[in-house]
Image (spheres, rainbow, N blue to C red):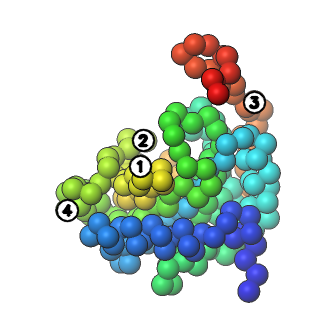
């Protein structure tokens, strides 16, 4: 069976199964929950634009916005990704550089929508959670960081719902206009990083 999105981003089914199995080994069963998104990171701006173009061919909308100093795409797929035992992932979060710390390139995390019980969920699984992100008033996911720098994030709302709560809509393909890729600047200035 043809899998055009898999041809673009890689074996997302194996990634989802690997992360599910890692969670089960830590006592977390995600089977009862909705999956909200799959995050894919790329190291170069040109690669971001290329993947964005390819993925948009299989999407009904892209709500690209600026977050953390750079555009990011929230690509709503025409056909959700089918993973695990009948679960679906409707949205791809495509993330370009610049990165503030070490991240896994390619498939980097997926979001589990726990819902209103997310705080109780975090207390129940505190011993295996790595931390919590404070992104905005609507999105403060808990997460687990694995040894290969991939994550699973646990959300109150899906990323689509977060964007809609902030007034965004998924009504076609929208890009950030006039954005110029940033140069990497370190504490020593805009010099290249040592090799």
On residue 124, the disc is 4
Q: CA distance from mark 1 to mark 3?
A: 27 Å
Q: CA distance from mark 4 to mark 1?
A: 20 Å
The answer to whether 69 is drawn above or below residue 47 in the figure is above
Q: Residues within 10 Å of mark 2 (few under 14, many from 20)?
A: few
Q: Which mark is nearer the camera, 1 or 3? A: 3
Q: Is residue 187 left or right of residue 19?
A: right
Decide: marks 1, 2 in contact (CB < 8 A)?
yes
On residue 136, the disc is 2
Q: Pinpoint residue 36: horizontal percent, then vertical percent.
A: 49, 65
Q: Which residue is mark 3?
A: 180
Q: CA distance from mark 4 to mark 2?
A: 23 Å
The quarter of the picture where the N terminus appears is bottom right
Element at label 3:
loop
On residue 139, the disc is 1
Please report the residue visible at 74 percent of the width from the left and 64 percent of the height from the top: 8
Decide: marks 1, 3 in contact (CB < 8 A)?
no
Q: Which mark is nearer the camera, 4 or 2? A: 4
Identify which residue, 54 or 106, lies in the foreground: 106
Q: CA distance from mark 2 to mark 3?
A: 25 Å
Q: Pinpoint residue 123: horizontal percent, then vertical percent.
A: 19, 57
Q: Which mark is nearer the camera, 4 or 1? A: 4
Q: Can residue 171 be seen? A: no
């Amino acid at each position: 069976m043809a899998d055009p999105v898999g041809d673009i981003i890689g074996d997302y089914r194996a990634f989802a199964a690997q992360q599910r199995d890692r969670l089960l080994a830590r006592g977390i069963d995600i089977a009862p929950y909705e999956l909200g998104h799959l995050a894919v990171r790329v190291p170069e701006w040109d690669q971001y634009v290329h993947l964005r173009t390819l993925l948009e061919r299989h999407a009904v909308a892209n709500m690209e916005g600026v977050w953390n100093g750079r555009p990011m795409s929230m690509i709503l797929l025409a056909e959700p990704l089918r993973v695990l035992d009948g679960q679906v992932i409707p949205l791809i979060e495509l993330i370009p550089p610049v990165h503030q710390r070490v991240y896994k390139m390619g498939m980097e995390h997926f979001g589990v929508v726990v819902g209103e019980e997310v705080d109780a969920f975090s207390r129940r699984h505190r011993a295996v959670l790595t931390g919590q992100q404070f992104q905005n008033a609507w999105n403060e996911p808990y997460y687990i960081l694995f040894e290969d720098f991939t994550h699973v994030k646990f959300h109150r709302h899906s990323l689509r719902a977060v964007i809609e709560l902030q007034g965004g809509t998924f009504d076609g393909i929208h890009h950030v206009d006039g954005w110029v890729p940033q140069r990497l600047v370190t504490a020593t200035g805009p010099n290249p990083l040592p090799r």
